[in-house]
Image: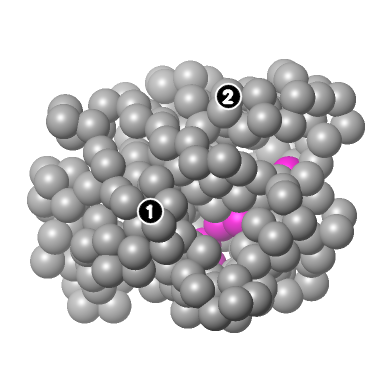
Amino acid sequence: MSGKRVLIVVTSVGEYESVGYRTGLWLGELTHFWDYLHDAGGTATIASIAGGPVPLDPESLTPDVLNDLGTGKRYADRTFMDLLDTTVSIADVTADDYDAIYLTGGHGVMFDFPDEPHLARLLREFHETGKVVSAVCHGPAGLLGSTLSNGEYLIAGRNVTGFSWPEEEFAHRADAVPFSLQARLEERGAVYSFAAEPFAPHVVEDGRLVTGQNPASARPVAEAVVKQLG
């Protein structure tokens, strides 16, 4: 595992289009993955859609959330948080430099992940060269726009998960999101599954494709990715 490199992709969108709520990266979905990867000997680069500073979902900065798996410690870490001020744009990275890609969540990704051509290209390149493609929570929204060289959707016929519609309703965001991630994944041909209990960890592995359902699944996704890279 030592020396393996992961490209972590985060949103550049900090607000919803139809309501006034603020959003952005769900911080724990970055830190839980980051810490496990680095403890295992891997390294990561954080890239965003537009490059530059990354907005943080304020809901991910509440005391209860920050107390989970050391997220608050990272939030207080000036060196780590400075990384989120100077992210590289995904337009300027190449799959050749990495062994895996990981798409974080936060509702912001629903607005800039699905139709981003550079992200779609990267995902195709990672997948078609046998590298690990992973995503958590709303991060699988990035898989929606990626097609393979034969024109088929990357997720067609593949077992995946992602933030469920019941969880969206529980989070009071059903009227704010631009679409149901669960429904859209199924429309693109994915075989979707989710945990019966909202917000319980749930990870699906289909070959080199690894997806997690919600914030609680970020660490288990990291564990699965590290195992595959090992």
The amino acid at mark 2 is Glu
Number of marks in picture: 2
Tell me if residue 217 is in the magenta stretch: no
- Measured as percent of width and height from the top left, residue 186 is found at 27, 61
Magenta stretch holds residue 8: yes
User: Camera-side residue: 224 or 130?
Assistant: 130
- Above or below, 189 against 36 in this view is below
| Residue at 72% in and 50% down | 130
**52 sits to left or right of 117:** right
In the rendered image of this protein, does residue 87 appear above or below residue 113? above
**Where does residue 115 sit, x and y in percent of width and height?**
47, 79
Residue drawn at x 26%, y 27% as measured from the top left? 200
**What percent of the width, then of the height, locates residue 29?**
48, 39
Quadrant placement of the C terminus: top right
Q: Amino acid at mark 1?
A: His
Q: Looking at the figure, which quarter contains the N terminus?
A: top right
**Secondary structure category for the residue under label 1:** loop
Vertical arrangement, residue 171 with respect to residue 40, above or below: below
Identify the main secondary structure in magenta. strand
Mark 2 residue element: helix
Label 1 environment density (alpha carbons within 10 Å; few <14, some 14–19, many ≥20): many
From the image, tell me which residue sits under label 1: 138
Query: Which numbered dot is residue 223?
Result: 2
Image point (22%, 62%), residue name? 183
**Residue for point 48% across, 70% down:** 153
Regarding residue 74, the answer to whether it shows in the image is no
Magenta span covers which residues?
6-12
